[in-house]
Amino acid sequence: MKFGRFEIHSVSDGFFRLDGGAMFGVVPRVIWERTNPPDDKNRIILGLNPLLIITEQRKILVDTGIGNKDDAKFCSLYAVDRKPTMEESLAKLNLSVNDINIVVSTHLHWDHAGGNTTKGTDGKIRPAFPNAKYIIQRGEWDEATAPNERTKGSYHQEDFLPLKQAGQLELIEGDTSVEDGINIIRIPGHNRHFQTVLISSNNQKAIFLGDLIPTASHLLYPYIMGYDLFPLETLKAKKQLLQRAAEEDWLLIFEHDPKVKMGHIEMQSGKPVLYNYQITS
């Protein structure tokens, strides 16, 4: 869709499933299962929906999905279904992996950065976007390359170490601008160095929510993932962001909702309520 002087597209790398209790934290299953019914293993379906931003100068991809490197056991555990793949999604826009100039990783967890790299027919792992610069927070890089017992399972080293070896890595600290109207902002909560992208053009604003608010079901303030390392910081950030988004009519873009790609909110009795939203067919 056109967004001011840019184009933005919610692209797909398929779907996967995670434990519903972990996804909704302190919210009881009897509540969250009304909108997110689990399977017989208590897993809910989630989308893998990176954001493609097309400017006059660049094609910018925010997150990359899971990618193609995981084995059958992993794919079964998380019910990975890469239909469509990232490559297929780009092809629908007459683009290929070679056209991407910048990849912004919100963070380096495997469901967001797995597609940063790819395994070739020769078995070697290399950057999936050979002409792209990968922008990552330095603090996130440091924590991902030396994880602790709590975070180790979230990071797969092959998702990001090849970026440095290929000379395609750019580490930043804090907020920065990719170009006029495309701003990277750091929002601690999910982890210490989570970052995302705020798009501004022609008095309009859109924000890619990533794991701050992974699905439309997570708009309500108490709905915070058990995966978040700093849930009270997530709560504070959600309240500030959503109140401003309602006041200024921002477009909210969801990364993990299997149906709702993006939409606007309004406050009703102090609660954010989604309206004018786009869903997949």
Image (cartoon, helix red, strand yellow):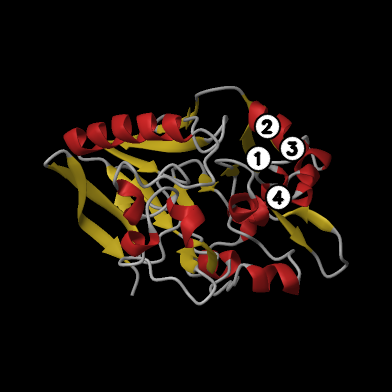
Q: Earlier in the sequence, mark 3 or mark 4?
A: 3
- Asked if the residues shown at circle 2 and circle 3 are in contact, with their CB atoms under 8 angstroms apart, the answer is no
What is the CA distance from the residue labelled 2 to the residue labelled 3?
Answer: 20 Å
Q: Residue at x 59, y 44 (%)?
A: 103
Query: Is mark 1 in CB contact (under 8 Å) with mark 2?
Result: yes
Residue 151, located in which quarter of the rendered image?
Answer: top right
Give the amino acid at mark 2. Answer: Glu
Cβ atoms under marks 3 and 4 closer than 8 Å: no
Amino acid type shown at disc 1: Lys
Which dot, 1 or 3, sits closer to the camera? 3
Going from N to C along the chain, the mark reached first, 1 or 3, is 1
What SS does tag 3 mark? loop
Q: Residues within 10 Å of mark 4 (few under 14, many from 20)?
A: few
* Numbered circles on residues, count: 4
Q: x%, y% of residue 220? A: 29, 46
Compared to 279, does 209 lie above or below? above
Say which mark, if any, is on residue 153: 4
- Picture residue at 73% right of the left edge, 65% below the top: 70
Disc 3 marks which residue?
147
Looking at the rendered structure, which numbered label has been put on residue 170?
2
In the rendered structure, are the residues bearing label 4 and label 1 in contact, judged by CB atoms less than 8 Å apart?
no
